[in-house]
Amino acid sequence: MHIIYWLILLNVVVVGQDMERTCVVAVCTRDRPQFLGRCLHSLTALQHGEGVTLRLLVVDNSASPIPSQRVVDLAADGLAPLSPVLVHEPRVGIPFARNRAFDFADEIGAESVIFLDDDQTAAPNLALTLCRVQEEEKCDAVKCEVRWEFEAPQRFKEFFYRPPATPEPLRWPYSSFLVPTNGVLIGRRLWDDLGLRFNEEFPLTGGTDVDFFARAWDYGVKIIHTSETFATEFCDAAKQRMSWLLRRSFRVGNTEAAMRLKGRGRIYYFAKGLLWIPWYGLLAARNLPAPNTSLHYFLKSVKGAGLMAGSIGIGVNEYRHIIGR
């Protein structure tokens, strides 16, 4: 009887261990210690439990990790339950940093990675909710809602976020690959079984998150958006300028064409840009009495110029210079 008792007890312990899963919360940062401090302070309030072990990874992508290490040290007491680790990725570019997070997840046997931008703060229930939704939906990735905090002068808000015309459901599956990494859980199957990595051929252009999910989409992955939790993104004054909006629009088109998403060729993107420039330029002119509408169309015209440039091999490394602090 004693032997049977201990066998049952051992089985319960083993099953309990099998139910425990590890999730890495990864924050990639480069020369923005103030933003990183805000982000890490929010992570001190992360909820724990429900069979999930959370680990914090800070990937420093700057020339020296010393400023980031100081920020981590300042928050060390509050971050202790996350067993924080800081690694230095000297190759400059966000895809290098994100792939380093996958490597770390492999090292500790984690089942998923949650990516947060260093200019974001997390809701306390962020990590556990994303893990729970992934388990309930049996999906490969879960994207949280993103809310915005604008620094003064709070200009051009509608060009960063446009609320949906009708209330969104609590959860809905993505119908395209346009998934950003600012608050997304990626399951192990994507980088392990499918062998997906962020494209290191474009280290400073941006857009490698869209490229990653475009390739994932080809495998028929299931991606869920949930409004059960959120991350708040901080938009500093430096981004609330016409010049930045113009550069971003050009870069988005440029990167899309350079990466040739969904297997479309150079001719497709050249022709698309050639059409967009005059068409949306005309719409911008026709809507001059409505400045926001006019600017919306003008930015699409600028994106068309980026499409054409990217299609003939002219690239833009927008992230060579860091905006933020």
Image (cartoon, grey):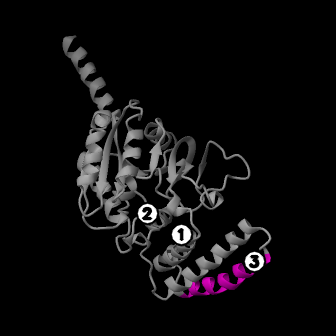
Disc 1 to disc 2: CB gap under 8 Å: yes
Question: Which residue does the image show at 27% across and 56% down from the upper left?
Answer: 103
Residue indicated by mark 1? 244
Q: Residues within 10 Å of mark 2 (few under 14, many from 20)?
A: few
Instruction: Say which residue label 2 marks.
Output: 323
In the image shown, does 304 or 18 lie closer to the viewer? 304
284 in the magenta segment: yes
- Indicate which disc, 3 or 1, sits on the residue closer to the N terminus: 1
Name the spot of residue 217 as percent of width and height, x first: 50, 63
Q: CA distance from mark 2 to mark 3?
A: 31 Å
Q: Nearer the viewer, residue 292 or 57?
A: 292
The answer to whether the residues at label 2 and label 3 have Cβ atoms under 8 Å apart is: no
- First in sequence: mark 1 vs mark 2: 1
| Image location (x, y in percent) of residue 3 | 19, 15
Mark 1 residue element: helix
Q: Of discs 3 and 1, which sits in the foreground? A: 1
Instruction: Point out which mark residue 283 bears.
Output: 3
Tell me which segment is drawn in magenta. Answer: 267-286
Q: Which residue is at a point 29% across and 31% down the rendered structure image?
A: 17
Looking at the rendered structure, the kind of residue marked 2 is: Ile
